[in-house]
Amino acid sequence: MTSDVATIAGIDAPTGLLIGGQWSEGRAGRLPVINPATEDALTDVADASPEDAIEAVDAAARALPLWAARPPRERGECLRRAYELTVSRAEQLARLMVLENGKALRDARGEVLYAAEFFRWYAEEAVRIDGSLTVAPSGANRIMAIRQPVGVSVLITPWNFPAAMATRKIGPALAAGCTVVLKPAKETPLTALAVAAILAEAGVPDGVVNVLPTTRPGPLTEVMLGDPRVRKLSFTGSTEVGRVLLKLAADTVTNCSMELGGNAPFLVFDDADIDAAVDGAFVAKMRNGGEACTAANRFYVHEAVAAEFAGKLTARLAALRVGPGLDEGVDLGPLVNADTRAKVASLVDSATRDGAAVLTGGQAPKRAGYFYQPTVLDSVPASSAILSEEIFGPVAPIVRFATTDEAVALANNTEYGLVSYLYSRDLRRCLQVAEALEAGMIGVNRGVVSDPAAPFGGVKQSGLGREGAHDGLLEFTETKYIAVDW
Ligand code: NAD
């Protein structure tokens, strides 16, 4: 397969590298894209080499001066058209995403609309890049501060939200006047390439957005970060890879934004509305099949309500229909690949060896595809590995607690700090606990926090910087201070 476009399930999808507005072959050959529901290859796409990466940086650097100089309104209007095109193609994009990622069609449809919203939000933010003018305390001078685009930006995205993680970076980068090289995960290049094609159709000039699928992310990123024209790295992925990239970026002091892993605690207090807590727990756990950095990873439930909560959550998970994501009525598709499923299975097995009780699930069904049953584990010992590692699958471990202090201490006992959830009817307790929890985001009586207009990001080893909101735009700008004497 060498053509630039493959027709997959009736959908035409670009399969080349996008460099300087041209679809091209990669110097490293082709890489297969696997359907996780069947384990078969769907198609293949061009595989970029480090030489291709330098060409992409050349293209982004050439396009930068003109794009940065385009009136903010015009940059915003390109993003607005991209929003409209994404919404008008939502069903095709969702289906393409299901085929390469595995998620259920309902989740994919939700993601496409969420992804489109980043284009709409940053179309609006493009015209709100402010600065400041103040009087020096001495009264003698004026202090003028303006914001300029940081420059050529390398964007690296994971496979779990292949559209939204790309638009959450491309939207603010383009609004700020930056040009980008996007390196999607090798599992989900088709969605990223389809998003790039939409941006081109929306009028984004050649070279402003370049896309490089690759099987060799390390050497590719190393050569780009070593190039002095690259001034920004925006990464979403695991904490493990984030640490490697921060060290690499240190050599060239490249500006970094890092959206890394999570280990979200979900706290249910004795005064919570249990039905509402189960609804919230269900979505916090099962959105995207559990393959989300925001997924509730550990359920800490007060001992007085634990049995009721566990019973109701188990009934919800046990009723889910598992199958290929494109099948109507399927609630839970396969995991993305064999490694992800093996990790989920090994965490569940070690928790049961530690003494956890399996309330439902606990196994991979015997069929083709990387499926894993929705699983609830009760009475999980505090030392179990499943409470300290990201599960990234449809598994809900429950731990009982007795006091609020104990719950907060358990929740904070992790190097991660992306999001925490809590359920209680007592507003005073909600706010006190929300302040005590070490996380960048807190869901109070809510199981979802993501919103393009909200500052998304973590503390501790869950990341640096924020995406979404106005904050996400500022990540792609540099402040310049102009000392003025007049
Ligand atoms: P990953 O870290 O393995 O890969 C993420 C990206 O980094 C991929 O594009 C991959 O190709 C690339 N990569 C891998 N090794 C690299 C290297 N040496 N140099 C440069 N790039 C490299 O993560 P994943 O398995 O794709 O995604 C799951 C992880 O992403 C989870 O830890 C999840 O919590 C995290 N995540 C975080 C957020 C957030 O906003 N905080 C959002 C989604 C996912």
Image (cartoon, helix red, strand yellow):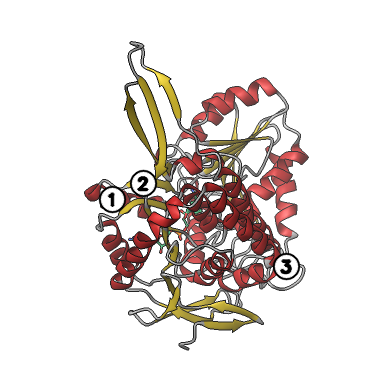
Q: Is residue 9 above or below residue 427?
A: below
Q: Which residue is mark 1?
A: 249
Q: Are marks 1 and 2 in contact (CB under 8 Å)?
A: yes
* Earlier residue among tags 2 and 3: 2
Identify the residue at image location x=44%, y=48%: 260
**Residue 22 found in image quarter:** bottom left
* Mark 3: amino acid: Val
| Residue located farthest toward the top when viewing the structure as drawn | 138
Q: Are marks 2 and 3 in contact (CB under 8 Å)?
A: no
Q: Which residue is mark 2?
A: 256
Q: Determine crowd level at label 3: few under 14, some 14-19, many 20+ residues with C-alpha closer than 10 A.
A: some
Q: What is the distance, in whole Å, between disc 1 and disc 2 at their CAs?
A: 8 Å
Query: Which quarter of the image is occupied by the C terminus?
Result: top left
Could you tell me residue 76's position as x and y percent?
57, 51
Most foreground residue, 115 or 378: 115
| Residue located farthest toward the left when viewing the structure as drawn | 251
